[in-house]
Amino acid sequence: MTDNVLRIPKTLMPVRLWVHPEGQVIGSLYLREGDTPGATEQPLDVLNQANPFLVVRRENPDEIRFYNRASVIRVDYETPAAAPAAGDTVLHCVVEMMDGSLVEGEIREVLPPEHSRLFDYLNQRDNHFIKLHTGEREVCLVNKSYIIHARADD
Protein backbone atom coordinates (compact mmCIF):
# COMPACT_ATOMS: atom_id res chain seq x y z
CA MET A 1 0.00 0.00 0.00
CA THR A 2 1.35 3.45 -0.92
CA ASP A 3 0.80 6.80 0.76
CA ASN A 4 -1.14 8.02 -2.31
CA VAL A 5 -4.03 5.68 -1.46
CA LEU A 6 -4.66 7.66 1.73
CA ARG A 7 -4.05 11.07 0.18
CA ILE A 8 -7.03 13.36 -0.45
CA PRO A 9 -6.58 15.35 -3.69
CA LYS A 10 -6.29 19.07 -2.88
CA THR A 11 -5.66 22.27 -4.80
CA LEU A 12 -3.80 25.28 -3.39
CA MET A 13 -5.66 28.61 -3.52
CA PRO A 14 -3.46 31.71 -3.00
CA VAL A 15 -4.92 34.02 -0.31
CA ARG A 16 -4.08 36.93 1.97
CA LEU A 17 -5.25 36.37 5.53
CA TRP A 18 -5.49 38.90 8.34
CA VAL A 19 -4.93 37.02 11.59
CA HIS A 20 -5.27 38.42 15.11
CA PRO A 21 -2.79 39.43 16.48
CA GLU A 22 -0.20 38.35 13.86
CA GLY A 23 -1.37 40.61 11.03
CA GLN A 24 -1.26 39.87 7.31
CA VAL A 25 -0.27 36.35 6.24
CA ILE A 26 0.43 35.48 2.60
CA GLY A 27 -0.14 31.86 1.73
CA SER A 28 -2.56 29.32 0.32
CA LEU A 29 -5.55 27.34 1.54
CA TYR A 30 -5.94 23.68 0.67
CA LEU A 31 -9.19 23.07 -1.23
CA ARG A 32 -10.56 19.58 -1.72
CA GLU A 33 -10.96 18.60 -5.36
CA GLY A 34 -14.40 17.38 -6.39
CA ASP A 35 -15.26 14.25 -8.34
CA THR A 36 -16.31 16.29 -11.36
CA PRO A 37 -14.38 19.09 -13.10
CA GLY A 38 -15.07 22.50 -11.55
CA ALA A 39 -16.40 20.99 -8.31
CA THR A 40 -13.47 22.08 -6.15
CA GLU A 41 -14.22 23.18 -2.62
CA GLN A 42 -14.34 26.98 -2.18
CA PRO A 43 -12.43 29.06 0.42
CA LEU A 44 -15.73 29.96 2.13
CA ASP A 45 -16.45 26.24 2.57
CA VAL A 46 -13.08 25.77 4.29
CA LEU A 47 -13.54 28.76 6.61
CA ASN A 48 -17.09 27.79 7.61
CA GLN A 49 -16.18 24.25 8.66
CA ALA A 50 -16.69 23.28 12.29
CA ASN A 51 -13.06 22.27 12.91
CA PRO A 52 -11.29 24.83 15.10
CA PHE A 53 -8.10 24.90 12.97
CA LEU A 54 -7.42 25.33 9.26
CA VAL A 55 -4.32 24.50 7.25
CA VAL A 56 -2.40 27.33 5.58
CA ARG A 57 0.70 26.91 3.44
CA ARG A 58 2.73 30.06 4.13
CA GLU A 59 4.96 31.68 1.54
CA ASN A 60 7.49 33.38 3.79
CA PRO A 61 8.62 31.40 5.65
CA ASP A 62 7.76 28.44 3.41
CA GLU A 63 5.96 26.22 5.91
CA ILE A 64 2.61 24.74 6.81
CA ARG A 65 0.80 26.25 9.78
CA PHE A 66 -2.46 25.43 11.51
CA TYR A 67 -4.36 28.64 12.28
CA ASN A 68 -7.17 28.90 14.80
CA ARG A 69 -10.19 29.72 12.66
CA ALA A 70 -11.56 32.09 15.34
CA SER A 71 -8.44 34.30 15.06
CA VAL A 72 -8.78 34.77 11.28
CA ILE A 73 -10.26 38.24 10.76
CA ARG A 74 -10.63 38.15 7.00
CA VAL A 75 -9.35 36.42 3.87
CA ASP A 76 -8.88 38.06 0.45
CA TYR A 77 -8.41 36.24 -2.84
CA GLU A 78 -9.01 36.59 -6.56
CA THR A 79 -11.52 34.65 -8.59
CA PRO A 80 -12.45 34.66 -12.28
CA ALA A 81 -14.63 37.65 -13.14
CA ALA A 82 -18.32 36.79 -13.06
CA ALA A 83 -21.59 38.68 -12.87
CA PRO A 84 -24.18 37.64 -10.29
CA ALA A 85 -25.89 34.39 -11.26
CA ALA A 86 -29.55 34.26 -12.21
CA GLY A 87 -31.62 34.03 -9.04
CA ASP A 88 -28.98 35.64 -6.82
CA THR A 89 -30.04 38.29 -4.35
CA VAL A 90 -27.48 41.11 -4.52
CA LEU A 91 -26.97 43.11 -1.33
CA HIS A 92 -24.60 46.09 -1.49
CA CYS A 93 -23.10 46.78 1.92
CA VAL A 94 -20.32 48.33 3.96
CA VAL A 95 -18.85 46.47 6.93
CA GLU A 96 -16.78 48.18 9.63
CA MET A 97 -14.26 45.90 11.27
CA MET A 98 -12.87 46.06 14.83
CA ASP A 99 -9.52 47.32 13.48
CA GLY A 100 -11.32 50.34 11.96
CA SER A 101 -11.12 49.13 8.36
CA LEU A 102 -14.14 49.35 6.06
CA VAL A 103 -14.97 46.59 3.62
CA GLU A 104 -17.33 47.62 0.83
CA GLY A 105 -18.83 45.06 -1.49
CA GLU A 106 -21.81 43.03 -2.46
CA ILE A 107 -23.22 39.77 -1.24
CA ARG A 108 -24.40 37.51 -4.06
CA GLU A 109 -26.42 34.61 -2.72
CA VAL A 110 -29.60 32.75 -3.49
CA LEU A 111 -31.78 33.80 -0.57
CA PRO A 112 -35.45 33.04 0.06
CA PRO A 113 -37.58 36.22 -0.25
CA GLU A 114 -38.55 36.12 3.44
CA HIS A 115 -34.83 36.11 4.42
CA SER A 116 -33.29 38.33 1.76
CA ARG A 117 -32.29 41.33 3.89
CA LEU A 118 -28.72 42.09 5.00
CA PHE A 119 -29.86 41.54 8.60
CA ASP A 120 -31.09 38.03 7.72
CA TYR A 121 -27.86 37.15 5.91
CA LEU A 122 -25.65 38.31 8.77
CA ASN A 123 -27.70 36.33 11.30
CA GLN A 124 -27.32 32.95 9.59
CA ARG A 125 -26.13 30.71 12.40
CA ASP A 126 -24.34 28.09 10.30
CA ASN A 127 -21.75 30.47 8.86
CA HIS A 128 -19.01 32.26 10.78
CA PHE A 129 -17.71 33.98 7.63
CA ILE A 130 -19.54 35.99 4.99
CA LYS A 131 -18.50 36.44 1.37
CA LEU A 132 -18.26 39.94 -0.11
CA HIS A 133 -17.41 40.61 -3.75
CA THR A 134 -15.24 43.72 -3.38
CA GLY A 135 -14.29 44.11 -7.05
CA GLU A 136 -14.67 42.50 -10.44
CA ARG A 137 -12.36 39.64 -9.43
CA GLU A 138 -11.75 40.32 -5.74
CA VAL A 139 -13.47 38.49 -2.90
CA CYS A 140 -13.22 39.13 0.84
CA LEU A 141 -14.35 36.57 3.40
CA VAL A 142 -15.11 38.34 6.67
CA ASN A 143 -15.29 36.75 10.11
CA LYS A 144 -18.61 37.94 11.57
CA SER A 145 -17.07 37.98 15.07
CA TYR A 146 -14.85 40.92 14.04
CA ILE A 147 -17.64 43.04 12.54
CA ILE A 148 -18.60 46.12 14.59
CA HIS A 149 -21.47 47.06 12.31
CA ALA A 150 -22.77 46.63 8.77
CA ARG A 151 -25.04 48.80 6.72
CA ALA A 152 -26.83 48.43 3.43
CA ASP A 153 -25.26 50.61 0.74
CA ASP A 154 -27.91 50.97 -1.95
Image (cartoon, grey):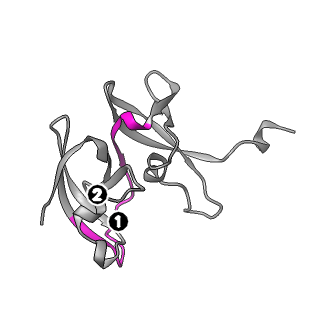
- Spot occupied by residue 91 in the image (x, y as percentages of width and height): 23, 66
- At x 78%, y 37%, the residue is 3
Tell me: residue 145, above or below residue 66.
below
- At x 31%, y 25%, the residue is 21
- Spot occupied by residue 148 in the image (x, y as percentages of width and height): 18, 44
Near mark 1 (Cα within 10 A), the count class, few <14, some 14-19 or many ≥20, is few
Quote the CA–CA distance across marks 2 and 1. 23 Å
According to the image, label 2 marks what residue? 122
- Spot occupied by residue 9 in the image (x, y as percentages of width and height): 65, 47
112 and 18: which is toward the camera: 112
Would you say 77 lies left or right of 150 here? Answer: right
Which label's residue is closer to the chain start, 2 or 1? Answer: 1
86 and 136: which is toward the camera: 86
Q: Is residue 150 covered in magenta?
A: no
- At x 25%, y 54%, the residue is 134
Would you say 2 lies left or right of 141 here? Answer: right
Label 1: element kind? loop
Near mark 2 (Cα within 10 A), the count class, few <14, some 14-19 or many ≥20, is some
- Spot occupied by residue 20 in the image (x, y as percentages of width and height): 32, 29
Question: Which amino acid type is marked by label 2?
Answer: Leu
Tell me: residue 57, above or below residue 44.
above
- At x 36%, y 73%, the residue is 85
Label 2: element kind? helix
Question: Which amino acid type is marked by label 1?
Answer: Ala
Magenta segment, which residues?
A: 69-91
According to the image, label 1 marks what residue? 82
Mark 2 touches mark 1? (CB < 8 Å)? no
Q: Quadrant of the C terminus?
A: bottom left
80 and 97: which is toward the camera: 97
Q: Quadrant of the N terminus?
A: top right
Would you say 89 lies left or right of 127 here? Answer: left
